[in-house]
Amino acid sequence: MKIFTAVYDWTLKWAEHKFAPRMLALLTFAESVFFPIPPDVLLAPMVLAKPEKAWRLASLTTISSILGGCVGYMLGYMMFEPWIQPLITEFGYQTRFDTAITWFNEWGVWVVFIAGFSPIPYKLFTVSAGFLHMAFLPFLIASAVGRGMRFFLVAGLIRWGGEAIAHKLRKWIDVLGWTVVALIAIAYLILK
């Protein structure tokens, strides 16, 4: 089934739309607070569509992510009991949240950097940092460095690879897509 190829083609076409940067900023902001889809899925095709704007798009993504992370921090800091804890319980994230707390206790601010750079859900750590009343300035710096490195790396690799990467990615997108789906399903079954 070529589901991912169709989505990939649609995303590349949509990435050239005049409102695409605004949607990228909105998606990135939301992902840092609650949204499950990482901004890389829109950043990469936008850089493919307009490689001359790679650094501008990476900057926009980074800034939007940091702002969203600050909102997540504030929600954890001020609204954990009435809003966040019921959502964590409702969505079955209590174990993940407890793991995040344990990691904070072991590694401190480095957890924010790692979550910002890696595919670990950043939003979970923004809320956790606020809940634990982590010092805001180290949180902000770790977020800026981790998120900035990630988004500039994605933009740089896509800009450097250009059309060659686009053709190879399109050729393998369905295999990659179904592999990710299988890995998510396996991880869910193992962690459940």
Image (spheres, rainbow, N blue to C red):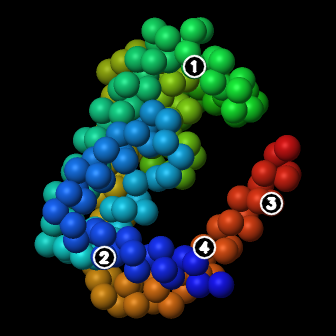
Q: How many marks?
A: 4
Q: Amino acid at mark 3?
A: Ile
Can you say whether 147 is above or below 137 in the image?
Answer: below
Gap in angstroms between the C-alphas marked 1 and 2: 37 Å
Q: Which residue is mark 4?
A: 177
Q: Earlier in the sequence, mark 3 or mark 2?
A: 2
The answer to whether marks 3 and 1 mark residues whose Cβ atoms lie closer than 8 Å is no
- Look at 43% across and 63% down and name the residue there: 41
Q: Nearer the viewer, mark 1 or mark 2?
A: 2
Position of residue 189 measured from the top left corner of the image (x, y, whole percent): 85, 53
- Residue at 24 percent of width and 59 percent of height: 20
Counting residues from the start of the chain, the first of labels 4 and 3 encountered is: 4
Name the secondary structure under disc 2. helix
Q: Is residue 12 visible?
A: yes
The residue mark sitting in front, 2 or 4, is 2
Whole-percent x, y for residue 90 in the image = 71, 26
Q: Earlier in the sequence, mark 2 or mark 4?
A: 2
- Whether label 2 touches label 4, CB < 8 Å: no
**Three-letter residue code for mark 4:** Gly
Estimate the spatial distance between the alpha carbons at disc 3 and disc 1, rounded to whole Å. Answer: 27 Å
The x, y position of residue 36, in whole percent, is 53, 46
Lower position in the chain sequence, tag 4 or tag 1? 1
Q: Does residue 162 appear to the left or right of 5 in the view shown? A: left
Instruction: Write down the residue under mark 1.
Output: 84
Q: Which residue is mark 3?
A: 186
Instruction: Name the residue that disc number 2 marks.
Output: 13
The residues tagged by marks 4 and 3 sit, at their Cα atoms, a distance apart of 14 Å
Q: Are marks 1 and 2 in contact (CB under 8 Å)?
A: no
Query: What's the distance in space between the residues labelled 4 and 1, CA to CA?
Result: 31 Å
